[in-house]
Image: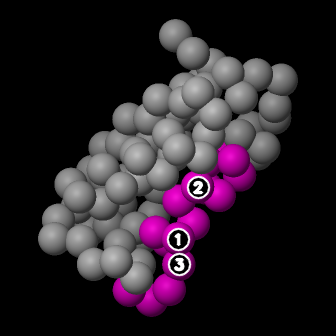
Amino acid sequence: MVQFASEAEVATAMKNAIESGVPDSTAEVTVNGGGHYALVVRSPAFEGKKLLEKQRLVYGTIAHLMAGNDAPVHAIDAMKTLPPA
């Protein structure tokens, strides 16, 4: 597991992972402290999908940051999956 110096670095890693893994997406990551984050992800890939399908798509891109006892991401407090603005 890659070690991060700060929660801001973790947020950047999450943003990059989501934007690389979810087609044509933009991601906003908010640090809530203590390994907790909130996400707003926009992508045309969400159109026609149910909420759970959208969430699984996003979680799949950041699973490596949530795996294991020493994972830098403890929880996603809120996630919005939206079509492009």
The segment highlighted magenta reads 55-70
- Structure colour scheme: one colour
Q: Quick check: marks 3 and 1 in contact, CB under 8 Å?
A: yes
Left or right, 39 with reference to 46: left
* Residue at disc 1, secondary structure: helix
Name the residue located 53 percent from the left edge and 78 percent from the top edge. Answer: 67
Question: Foreground: 2 or 67?
Answer: 2
Q: Few, some or many C-alpha atoms within 10 Å of disc 3 (few <14, some 14-19, many ≥20)? A: few
Name the residue located 36 percent from the left edge and 56 percent from the top edge. Answer: 13
For label 3, the residue is 67
Left or right, 42 with reference to 10: right
Name the residue located 53 percent from the left edge and 59 percent from the top edge. Answer: 62
Q: How far separated are the C-alphas under marks 2 and 1?
A: 8 Å
- Three-letter amino acid code of the residue under disc 2: Thr
For label 2, the residue is 61
* Residue at disc 3, secondary structure: loop
Labels 3, 1: front one: 1
